[in-house]
Image (cartoon, rainbow, N blue to C red):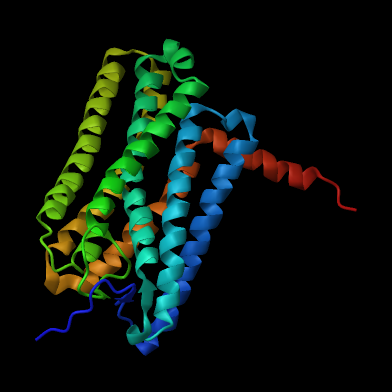
């Protein structure tokens, strides 16, 4: 008979299964990747907030994505790094820390959808209504879009975790590399029917809404480009929209691989790796892709390098 421990505040986290020979290479690669995520995203945010030429709605909205990447990876990666160096039998986490980790990481996933949705709206206004862009995308509108993006994610994830923490727990082992909602409600011996229904609804509705809004937005942008004879408009649309679409597809594919592998228990180890990559890959690629495609960011960086060269040393 299985031994049950009711409502224990100490949980065992299985984490990644790494061999002794691969432990340190995995640790170093993950540490370097995390360092790059911090430097690249924080660097982009500092550049946008310090350069007046970059204080445009498009870049200010992108800052939300950088904040989200830093937030999600800063909560996940250091914990994974610490667990790699500890034997699997000694990987423990407090229940409340686990709940907080699950909340932030689900916020990361939800924010990725909502932030990219408001960025798509910005591109739609810029291309389909260029003459009204300045009057529509004011500072107040940027704030409203930002608050709504984070607010919707907060409410949805709050309900998700609220339904889970009401359950009594009879198990203590989490088989994932980090805490998430599914891992938490699986600790309970009570009925989790409501959790499964809401979790499935959450998983389906949010991505479907973002996919639908992206398709609708890009359909209107494409129609505007086809009917317009302006080469500059089409060139602007191609550059800005290709960047945004690339960011969205990276996020979407990373999430889809994670969801698919979650349905096949025989690939549990691959699922753990994909769960970490879901956070690490977008966080690494987003600032690179946005930085490479943006002429304004290129100009600011080249100006900074030029100033360093001409500044006399004493």
Can the viewer see residue 244 in this picture?
no
Q: Is residue 269 above or below residue 57?
A: below
Q: Is residue 298 left or right of residue 12?
A: right
Q: Residue at x 25, y 21 (%)?
A: 220
Q: Residue at the location (29% across, 74% down)?
A: 8
In the displayed structure, 227 sits above or below 260; it is above
Tell which of 64 and 223 is nearer to you.
Answer: 64
Residue 29: image x %, image y %? 45, 71
Return the x and y of residue 52 as percentages of the image width and height. 63, 30
Which residue is at the far right? 314
Camera-side residue of 46 and 8: 8
Tell me where residue 196 sits by quadrant. bottom left
Residue 276 appearing in the image: yes
Q: Position of residue 194 (x, y in %)?
A: 12, 51
Number of marks in picture: 0
Q: Quadrant of the N terminus?
A: bottom left
Q: Is residue 30 above or below residue 66?
A: below
Residue visible at 27% across and 54% down in the picture: 254
Q: Quadrant of residue 4?
A: bottom left
In this rendering, the answer to whether 179 lies above or below 63 is below
Q: Residue at horizontal 90%, vertical 53%?
A: 314
**Quarter holding residue 156:** top left
x and y percentages locating residue 55 in the rendered image: 57, 30
Extreme residue toward the top, this view:
131
Apparent side of residue 256 relative to residue 136 in the rendered image (left or right): left
């Amino acid at each position: 008979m299985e031994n049950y421990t009711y409502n224990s505040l100490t949980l065992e986290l299985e984490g990644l299964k790494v061999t002794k020979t691969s432990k340190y290479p995995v640790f170093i690669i993950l540490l370097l990747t995390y360092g790059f995520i911090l430097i690249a995203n924080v660097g982009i945010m500092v550049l946008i907030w310090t350069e007046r030429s970059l204080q445009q709605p498009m870049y200010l909205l992108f800052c939300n994505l950088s904040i989200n990447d830093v937030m999600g990876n800063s909560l996940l990666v250091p914990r994974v790094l610490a667990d790699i160096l500890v034997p699997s039998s000694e990987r423990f986490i407090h229940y409340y820390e686990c709940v907080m980790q699950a909340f932030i990481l689900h916020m990361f996933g939800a924010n990725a959808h909502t932030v990219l949705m408001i960025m798509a709206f910005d591109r739609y206004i810029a291309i389909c209504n260029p003459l009204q862009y300045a009057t529509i995308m004011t500072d107040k509108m940027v704030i409203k879009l930002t608050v709504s993006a984070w607010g919707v994610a907060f409410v949805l994830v709050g309900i998700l975790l609220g339904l889970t923490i009401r359950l009594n727990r009879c198990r203590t082992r989490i088989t994932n590399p980090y805490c998430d909602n599914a891992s938490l409600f699986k600790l309970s011996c009570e009925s989790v029917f409501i959790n499964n229904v809401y979790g499935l609804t959450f998983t389906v509705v949010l991505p479907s809404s973002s996919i639908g809004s992206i398709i609708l937005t890009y359909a209107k942008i494409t129609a505007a480009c086809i009917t317009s004879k302006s080469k500059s408009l089409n060139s602007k649309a191609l550059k800005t929209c290709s960047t945004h679409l690339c960011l969205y597809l990276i996020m979407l594919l990373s999430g889809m691989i994670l969801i698919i592998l979650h349905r096949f228990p025989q690939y549990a180890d691959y699922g753990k790796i994909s769960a970490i990559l879901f956070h690490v890959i977008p966080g690494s690629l987003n600032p690179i892709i946005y930085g490479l495609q943006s002429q304004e960011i290129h100009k600011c960086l080249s100006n900074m390098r030029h100033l360093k060269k001409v500044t006399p040393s004493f």
